[in-house]
Each structure stands twice: as C-alpha cells, then as structure tokens.
Image (cartoon, rainbow, N blue to C red):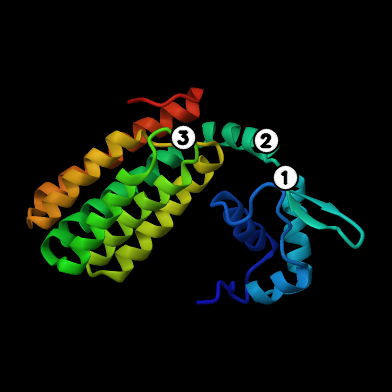
Amino acid sequence: MSPSLSPVSTSAAVATYIRKRIHVGEYAPGDRLPPQRELAVLLGVSRVSVREGLRVLVDEGYIRVSRGSAGGAFVTELSRPAEALRRRLRSQMSELDDLVDFRIAVESRIAYLAAMRAGRTDVNRLRAAIRMMRAIDKEATDHLPFRLADAEFHAALARGARNERLNRAVLDARDEMFIPYDMLSFDEPREAVLTDHLAIYEAVRDGKATLASELMAEHIQRTREQLLSFVADGSLTT
C-alpha cells in the first residue's frame, strides 16, 4: 500500500513521516534521502511541502543538506535532536501517562478478545514472535530486532482479537510511544518482556480471557515505570 499522505497534508506532516522513517532505521545516519521530486510523488504532496518539511528537519538537526552533483539531504548522527528530545519528553510526562493509560485500556481488551477469538494461525504467530525474541543475542546492542519481534507479538495479538479498529488504535499508540524512545536507545529489559509475553501467550492459547487481560495490563504498567525512569535519568528499572 502506498504511504501517500492525504491531500490536506502539510510540511509538518512531511517532516513527521520522514522523522519516523529515521527513528525506525529505514534511513540511518549518513544515508541520503530520496530526491525531493521522488518524495513528493511518494507522499502525494507538492515539492514545496517537501522542501518546507525538509527545512524543518534541518532546523531540528535530523538532516543536513549539501549542494552539487553529490549533494542532497543526508541524515545526521542525531546527537542534537536526541538531546532536545529528552528535554521535551521530560516536559511531557503527563502526556506519556495518558498514552500508557490508553494502551492499557486498548491492549488489555485486545488480549481478552484474542483469548476468546484467536485461531490456530494466530496462536502460531504469537509463538513465532516469542521464538524471534529468544533467538536474539542477549548481548546485542542493536535494540531494533527485539523491538520488531515485540511489535510482531502485539500485532499478532491484535489480529487475533478480530477487531480492525482496535488493531489500528494499538499500532498508532505503539508508534507514538516507542519511536521517540528508540531514538534515545531505550531498550526494554528483554528477559522481563519475554517472560511477560510468554505468560500472555499461554493465557491466550488456553482461552483464559480474564487472565490474558490482567497480564497485559500489568505488562504495560511495567513499561510505564521503565519509560518514566529512563526519561528522568537515562536508567531503566528492572
């Protein structure tokens, strides 16, 4: 499916789209972004909107622009936006709390419905995501593979709930929560996350809807505590 933005998208929306691609590693430090004309076609906006969106990212420190035949827009090492981001997140603790409350409400219901509705294929997807987590080197410093496996678990759970609106809601909430923290190298304690997911998987597999819901709420509450600790001083609670 094309990622085209809606016709009313602005330069801010262009900046947000590219910023997210940087955060998830699609564009890494040193990479050159596609030319403005390609971005305009890709996103379904004017070149003026793309140009203004790129200017926003330059001001924020995400990219630098050089001229000439070998020029273009290049992703920076991201130290400047990371420092600014941590300051901004510290001022938005109440928003983080609201977002976690939303995730608890949505994902605990998803876990409940998945335990009631998930079929064999859904259960197999959950088990496969857990296997992916277990296969990741515990000493690996790159947190992205584990985060992707974590996201696959939650996505499989949402599919098993058989409710597309809840599925979209949880995907949006997880993007909003984790993309900024990924930039700051936030990495959830892997063993604890794996233990939580295994317990949720077993409850869903066994059709224990109330237990699955309670376990999911507890899991996300632990994530809240870890995130707050990380934003405050850069450490993680365990």
Task: Compare marks 3 and 1 and give the one earlier in the sequence.
Answer: 1
Viewer-closest of 153 and 50:
153
Q: Is residue 5 above or below residue 110?
A: below
Q: Is residue 13 above or below residue 200?
A: below
Q: Is residue 25 left or right of residue 121?
A: right
- Which residue does the image show at 56% across and 71% down from the upper left? 3
Image coords of residue 120 (percent x, y)? 15, 67
The answer to whether marks 2 and 1 mark residues whose Cβ atoms lie closer than 8 Å is yes
Q: Is residue 50 left or right of residue 145?
A: right
Element marked by disc 1: loop
Image coords of residue 225 (percent x, y)? 35, 31
Camera-nearest label, 3 or 1? 1
What is the number of the mark on residue 93?
A: 3
Element marked by disc 3: helix
Q: Is residue 33 above or below residue 82?
A: below
- Which residue does the image show at 72% across and 60% down from the upper left? 33
Q: Is residue 193 left or right of residue 99?
A: left
Q: CA distance from mark 2 to mark 1?
A: 8 Å
From the image, which quarter does the C terminus lie in?
top left
Viewer-closest of 148 and 236:
148
- Going by the numbered disc 3, the residue's amino acid type is Met
Q: Is residue 129 left or right of residue 177?
A: left
Q: CA distance from mark 2 to mark 3?
A: 22 Å
Task: Compare marks 2 and 3 and give the one earlier in the sequence.
Answer: 2
Image coords of residue 31 (percent x, y)? 70, 53
Q: How busy is the neighbourhood of tag 1: few (under 14 within 10 Å), some, or many (20 plus)? A: many
Q: How busy is the neighbourhood of tag 2: few (under 14 within 10 Å), some, or many (20 plus)? A: few
- Going by the numbered disc 1, the residue's amino acid type is Thr
Viewer-closest of 69 and 137:
137
Q: Which of the 4 image quadrants contains residue 205?
A: bottom left
**Residue at image mark 2:** 79
What is the number of the mark on residue 76?
A: 1
